[in-house]
Every structure is written in C-alpha cells, then in structure tokens.
Image: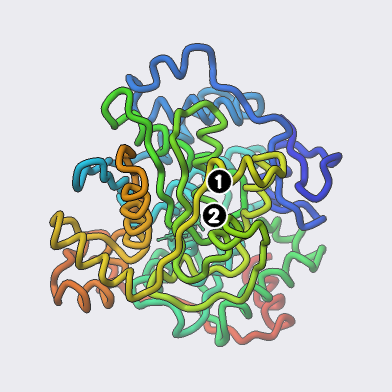
Amino acid sequence: MHYYSTNDHGLRVELKEAILRSLPADNGLYMPVELPKMPEGFWDNYRELDFQEIGYQVAMAFFGEDVADEALRDIVKGTLEFDAPLVEIAQQDHILELFHGPTLAFKDFGARFMARLMAWLTRHEDQMLTVLVATSGDTGGAVASAFQGVEGTRVVILYPKGKVSGLQEKQLTVIGGNITALEVNGSFDDCQTLVKSAFLDRKLSEDLNLTSANSINLSRLVPQSFYYIHAARQLPEGILPTFVVPSGNFGNLTAGLLAMKLGLPVEQFVAATNINDVIPAYLDSGEYKPRPSVATISNAMDVGAPSNFVRLKELFGDSFEDLRDHISGLAFDDAQTRAAIREVKETTGYTIDPHGAVGWLAAKSWRQAKPDSTTITLETAHPAKFLDVMDEELGKGSVEIPERLAVLADKEKVATPLGTDTTAFHQWLRDELV
Ligand SMILES: *Cc1c(COP(=O)(O)O)cnc(C)c1O
C-alpha cells in the first residue's frame, strides 16, 4: 500500500517511510492512497469475532500487503493484552472503557501497536532506532511503556519540569533500561522545539536513526479503530451506535471514521470538546479558526489547532456537507464537566473522569434531541489519573487507585536535567547515544 501527503496528492511513499518518518517533509499528513476494504463476509459475522480477531482483520486490511501475516498477528496480540469493555450505565447510555492498558489511557492502544510495528519494520537493521518524543502528560507515559524492552529501540522523552502531574512524571522516569527521561527546565513548547531541532540536524538525525512517536503517526490511528468495531458488536443486534468522542487532536475520532469507512454501521459521531471548541464551532459555521488553547480540567483535550483536522476533511473528500452529516459537535465548560461527574455518580453509580464527563454531557444532549438513539461514550482515561478533580467533586478517597499506578509512587525517579539550549541538547545526544 502507498501513502500520500495531504499537502501533495501526487507524493507516494511506502509504509516504512510513512511510519518511521511520521510526517512528510511538506508538513502534510500521510493518508493511504486507497482506503482498504474488509474481506468478503467480514461484516456479516463481525459480531461473532473477538477483539483480537477484529484487530487482526483490520490490521491485515491496512498493512497486510507490507507486513507478514504472522508478524501482524503477533503485533495485534501484543497490543491487545487488555480488553475494552462496554458498560451500560443507564438505558441507551453506554461507556466504552479504554483505560485498561498499562498507563490507564486509550493512548496505550496506539503506542503499543506503533512500537511493535516500528520494531518489525527495522528488524533487519543493525542501527538502533531512537524514538524522540516531547510530552505534556499522557503521550510520554504510553510511549515509554510501549517501547519498554523492545529490542533495537530506545526512547528519549523530554518533559517540562514541574508541569506534569506527579504520577505522570513517574510513568516516564521509573522505567529505566531503554527509556531515558530528560527533565527540561522550560515549557512543553520548549521541549517540542528541542525535539524538532534534533530532526532538523540531518547528520545527528541519521547518526541516531531518529524517529518520532507523535500522535499523527498513522500507525497510532489504525489500532484505535479496532475498539469501535469491538464496542458496536457488544450492543444488542440491530442497534446502531452513536459514538461520542471526547476530543483534542481528533485522532480518536478519525479512527472511528476509519472504522465507518471500512463498513461499520454507525448512526452518528459526536465530537465532544471542552471550551477549546474549534471543531464544534467549525461544524456550526463552516469556518475553521484555530486559536491558542486554554487550560481546563480535561487537559488532554486542551488543543487549539487539532492536528488531525486535515485528515477529517480528507476522509470526506473535502465536502463540508458530507462531513457535517456524519459528525456533530458539542462543547462544555469546566463547571458543566464538574457537575456531570457528580450527576453520573448520583444517578448511575458510575465514576467518570473529566474527559469522559465531557463526552457524557454530549451524549445526554444528543439523546435528548434523538430519544431513540443509543450512545457509546468513549471513556478515554481512568479517573485515578485526575485525583484532584475527582476528590473535589466526589470526596476524598472516592476513586480507587489501580495497582499499576499505585506501585509507581514508591519507585525512584531517574531523570537527567536539561536546559533549553539546542546545542547542549545535541551534545548530550551525541555523548550519550552515538
Ligand atoms: C489524548 C487524550 C484525549 C484526546 O484524544 P485525541 O485523539 O487527541 O482527540 C482525550 N482524553 C484523554 C484522556 C487523552 O489522553
């Protein structure tokens, strides 16, 4: 299969280039030249298949031409070592729990698949692959966990000192081995600038065999489409889901659309955002106006220029009408989100995190307008990742901390302090890694 750039439809690259380079040089995004089709009969009996088999079939449709059958099966098996259960919290009101992975957020699905695919694509190369990633929170942890112990790879994570939560920092800094954490005395933007500067230094980039693990990598999207299909099959026969997706960079929603384009029967997609409502505003007005993000309690969705917007448009052949027929947008502020956390608890007993709560509000509003609809709200992270807010709304101790998060508290942080000077950073990379 070949991949083109959204900025240059004539450009054609192979899978390896699209995955290891992540971004075309023209700053577009990679898309498959042709959307794959599921094999004959798949949609007649997908309800009988398990999560692994669904994942394998979808991965085959996208990557089967380029990746050996058995390898792809192993990649999917290694990715899906945990489930994505669907929980009915009230009539027609379902929650898809995507937080059962090692770092308790849906980003585990994409990061684990990407790590395994990258390792396979470089399996015959002697040179170590160096993954460089800047993180403001969840991505770094998912990437660190996904690449931990993966042969032929090492990961360097840059994070802003004092600007990630204590547990998030532990997720980056206690693994060791092939994972190195750099604690940057600066902002997230400084971290991103440092990462970019390393890629721009061609010699350094080649010497280190650098690759990036950012969220626009196509190999992070495809595995996220697995759980839309897996969720739909858990509904009673004949019921079409409306998927409600708490969104920031819109990778998750794009993955849902991929599942629909593959043939999954869906009633509608609802994009739920916090007050960073660039996409809901676009769906209203037809005008796309990116702007600086504003901090909220659903911070993983604080995005002012969603990086997958171009892919959304591309999937509908640039037709605004068509896009709006399939995606609706709703936005909610922090006060509404906090009230929703309490309301969900009081009316259903379910404990929902701030990101899921934004989604749940959109789902509720959708069902009020369309009483026959059945919604599936994606719960993108475990509430234990946002203890401050949960304690404030539901009382101290209301959220049980999963063992895999709790054990981090006692482990020792190992991080190398770093300034924001690019020369010093490049020197560190050379001294430590070349
Ligand atoms: C990353 C993230 C999101 C946003 O997902 P996108 O794919 O960027 O839209 C939502 N919730 C949580 C918890 C996240 O970590």
Residue 69 versus residue 251: which sits nearer the camera? 251
The residue positioned 65% from the left and 77% from the top of the image is 428
Residue linked to disc 2: 250
Residue 193 in the image: above or below residue 384: below
Q: CA distance from mark 1 to mark 2?
A: 6 Å
For residue 83, side relative to residue 148 (left or right): left
For residue 121, side relative to residue 71 (left or right): right
Residue 126 versus residue 122: which sits nearer the camera? 122
The residue positioned 37% from the left and 50% from the top of the image is 366
Q: Residue furthest top?
A: 41
Residue 401 versus residue 342: which sits nearer the camera? 342
- Residue 200 appears in the picture as rendered: yes
Where is residue 108 drawn, in percent x and y? 42, 51
Where is residue 331 drawn, in percent x and y? 45, 64
- Classify mark 2 as within 8 Å of ligand 1 or not, answering yes or no: yes
Under circle 2, the secondary element is loop
Amino acid at the residue labelled 1: Thr
Residue 235 versus residue 412: which sits nearer the camera? 235
**The label number, if any, that marks residue 47 in the structure image:** none
- Classify mark 1 as within 8 Å of ligand 1 or not, answering yes or no: yes
The residue positioned 67% from the left and 48% from the top of the image is 20
For residue 427, side relative to residue 113 (left or right): right
Residue 351 in the image: above or below residue 38: below
Under circle 1, the secondary element is helix
Where is residue 138 drawn, in percent x and y? 44, 64
Report crowding for label 2: few under 14, some 14 to 19, many 20 or more residues within 10 A (C-alpha). Answer: many
Residue linked to disc 1: 254
Whether the residues at callouts 1 and 2 have beta carbons within 8 Å, the answer is yes
